[in-house]
Image (cartoon, helix red, strand yellow):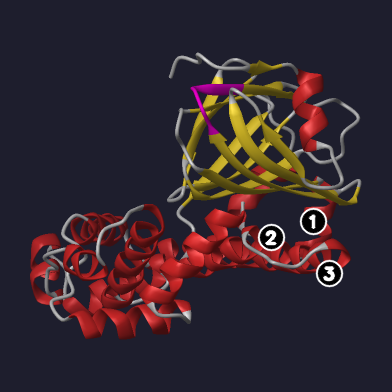
Amino acid sequence: MQSEGSYLNDGHFRKYFDASAPIYVNNENVSAIISNIEYSQEFQVRIAKILPKRDFSACYTSFRNEACTISGNFLLQGSLIATVAGAQQFTLNADRANLVKYGPSTTKFQIARGTDLQMLSYSISEEYLMRALEKDIPATFLPFLKPSEQGFNLLEFRPTPEMRRLVRSVISSPLVGTMRNLFIEGAVLQLMALKANFLSNQVSAAGMLNEYEVASVQRAYKLLMGSLSTPLSLSDLAYKVNLGEKRLNSGFKKIFGGTVFEVYRNERLEIARKTIEQSDASLSKIAQHIGYRHYNNFISAFTRQFGVSPAKYRRHSRDNQNTE
């Protein structure tokens, strides 16, 4: 993506991201609300809502004396491209969270014009991570606790619905002041625990399935996600990937944390939630798009999943947008 908008220098970008109170930015390039909460030198949280008015890029330089060298990044919506030290590049979107470790370097963030970005990031030190996890460090975390020749480690994963709900509660929290900071600290610690548990389960799950079964389960997941509006039955899905139905369900539980039906339900309801937020499509059309033939079934499922009806969720979402 070619950047045609502002290119903030290190000091300017750092001024926004090191502020203790929310910073409101509204100029010809971007509208944004950015908060940085520093709980200690080893634990910081950043929340950003950014709406670029043109293709937008910004640079942030980390320094050698910074203790927080490991960052976790979650996007509730939108996407961005990050380039570290002019070479290592990764993409962040609502379906791809990550854990990143890098040494002293400059990171360039690029966001396309019109992208409504909502992002939660936390930064921690290696010592903080080791103390928090004690002896229960997932094998996938170990590279972040060892010196790296490249000075860069990246772990990407698909956030679970529970992780997304936590991120949403942090970004949209109505609390202010000390109560807000306390709530965010607790939620981010929960998020770290969920991530560690999820990654640990993925590693152990992969060890309990042979290579063919892991590949078959992953192929089944792609088939399932590619046919949300016309779902495959469990028997059809199992037949297509040449696994037994029980083994396929077991594999889904081990790798994705739920049965085929549970994963399918959670994913399509998450798509419905995003569509309700980001479009004016009727609720009945949205229900049809994700495979619900009966509108009342969609309302019941959505309400169970998110604790509020689709209509109330849309009103609440628009009220929040109007007050920002």
For residue 53: magenta?
yes
Residue at point 30%, 73% (across, down): 265
**Residue that label 1 marks:** 130
For the image, the number of numbered tags is: 3
Asked whether the beta carbons under mark 1 and mark 3 sit within 8 Å of each other, the answer is: no
Residue 20's x, y, as percent? 87, 46
Q: Is residue 57 left or right of residue 66?
A: left
Tell me which amino acid carries mark 2. Ile
Tell me which amino acid carries mark 1. Met
Residue at point 37%, 74% (across, down): 310
Query: Which residue is nearer to you in this view: 253 or 321?
Result: 321
Vertical position of residue 158 compared to residue 13: above or below: below
Q: CA distance from mark 1 to mark 2?
A: 8 Å
Vertical position of residue 73 compared to residue 87: above or below: below
The crowding category of the residue bearing disc 1, from other C-alpha atoms within 10 Å (few below 14, some 14 to 19, many at least 20), is: some
Whether residue 225 can be seen here: yes
Whether residue 136 can be seen here: no
Asked whether the beta carbons under mark 2 and mark 3 sit within 8 Å of each other, the answer is: no
Q: Quadrant of residue 271?
A: bottom left
The N terminus lies in which quarter of the figure?
A: top left
**Residue that label 3 marks:** 179
Residue at point 15%, 81% (across, down): 294
Residue 29's x, y, as percent? 58, 23
Query: Which residue is nearer to you in this view: 64 or 266?
Result: 266
Residue range in magenta is: 52-57
The crowding category of the residue bearing disc 2, from other C-alpha atoms within 10 Å (few below 14, some 14 to 19, many at least 20), is: some
Dot 2 falls on a residue whose secondary structure is: loop
Dot 1 falls on a residue whose secondary structure is: helix
Asked whether the beta carbons under mark 1 and mark 2 sit within 8 Å of each other, the answer is: yes
Vertical position of residue 105 compared to residue 197: above or below: above
**Residue that label 2 marks:** 137
Dot 3 falls on a residue whose secondary structure is: helix
